[in-house]
Image (cartoon, rainbow, N blue to C red):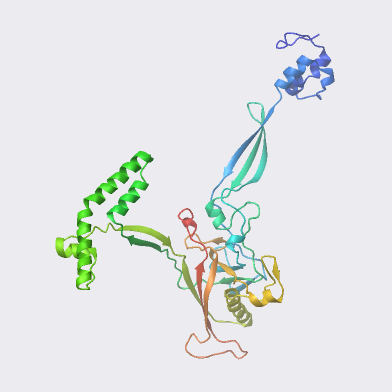
Amino acid sequence: MYNISNWQEASFSEDQIKNSLQYQILNNEGIFDPKNSSTTAMGDAYATKPTNITVKTIDDSYKLDTKGYSVDGEGGVLRYPGSPGIRSDSDYVLCTFYKYLPPAQDKSAVGHKTTAATTEGGLNDKNQNVTFKKINKNTMLNVYNHMGMGDGSKSYERTDEKQLMLYMPEDISTGYKANWNGKQLSAAGKRALQAASADGIGKKLMAVGDMYGQMWDRFGAHWSANTVRDLISSTTGDTLTDDEILSSMGGVVANPNTELLFGNIDMRTFSLKWKLVPRNQSEADSIKGIVLAFKKAMLPGTGVKEVFGISRGDGVEAGYISVPDLVKIAFMHGPEPADYLPQFKMCAITQVDVNYTPDGAYAIYQDGPVAATELTVNFQETKLVYREEVQHY
């Protein structure tokens, strides 16, 4: 017979002890059989059974859209110049074309959570089975940039156009423009705003009372100016403003209380220009394909088959056209984006100019291609850039 010190009320046979869950957990052997274990042994054994806990981590970090930063395989790219090959230290422009994604078509929402990964962590020092669960939470920027990971979220899809690889042009620049506007507020209007922004109902009421008190202080001057203005208008027909009357009679004008208020920021625009001179027939074909790719991406298409999934037929095809495609412009250094140059989000092509006589005279090769082509393309970013992500752009 065996007696276990922490089980004071009973003694157990060797088989009972070896069949107990506690013995099997401590010795890592046997299979627990509750039929051969006493009620007391089962109770204490279950007391040592590991509990299950889940540790959740919320990932609401900014997700950089890496589309358009990798080069397709051989045959999927149009290059100029065609040689020499791209090395790990080569700088070039990579253009990748995508279908337009309507903003309202993305069904992901700010705050939406989805499970990204679940990992079993095993037993911790408290005899707990730990499961780690990583949860992605959509932020405003990730949804705005179409990086939302919620149910129904969408992202940009490639078109059938090949990627374009072009040499670095002469003018690579970017700019950011913020629009601020001066706004005039009357003394009463400014005091009303201060009252509305005061903390607590008590301070709001005090500020409102102070506003009316100051308005009463100015009542005499404004009443006098209004009376004189009406009198002049009715007798002479002259039209004067309150400030003109106050200035001419009292040498004062109303305090404009002008404040500079932020309005918005402009979407970035930029232009790239290349001079394309073919050295052989292969490069001539590539140049023709490069120019065609930009023109096709800038223009709308016909052949719309349905709208909203409910309208179909010849009337739809005759009545609607498809929105032009977008392009991702990436300044690359070898296989990675060049971190010392600006980068851009998805861009719309606003203008394509092709000059077939850039040197001032018409010239062609004997077998047909023009001797040189100057290609100028204007782009506009389709999304704003915010301070939390500006280091990437």
Location of residue 297 (image quadrant) = bottom right
Q: Residue 252: x, y in percent? A: 18, 60
Q: Residue 57: x, y in percent? A: 59, 40
- Residue 321 against residue 125 in the figure, above or below: below
Number of numbered tags placed on the structure image: 0
> In the rendered view of the protein, which quadrant contains the N terminus?
top right
Q: Residue 284: x, y in percent? A: 61, 82
Q: Nearer the viewer, residue 339 or 189?
A: 189
Q: Residue 372: x, y in percent? A: 53, 84
Evaluate whether residue 81 shows in this view.
no
Q: Nearer the viewer, residue 64 or 109?
A: 109
Location of residue 368 (image quadrant) = bottom right
Relative horizontal placement of residue 148, taking residue 220 as reference (left or right):
right
Q: Name the residue rendered at 35%, 62% in the picture.
A: 181
Q: Name the residue rendered at 53%, 85% in the picture.
A: 356
Q: Name the residue rendered at 22%, 70% in the picture.
A: 234
- Residue 290 against residue 71 in the figure, above or below: below
Relative horizontal placement of residue 340, taking residue 179 as reference (left or right):
right
Q: Residue furthest front?
A: 235
- Residue 344 against residue 63 in the figure, above or below: below
Relative horizontal placement of residue 338, taking residue 100 as reference (left or right):
left
Q: Nearer the viewer, residue 333 or 122?
A: 122
Q: Nearer the viewer, residue 150 or 393?
A: 150
Evaluate whether residue 256 shows in this view.
yes
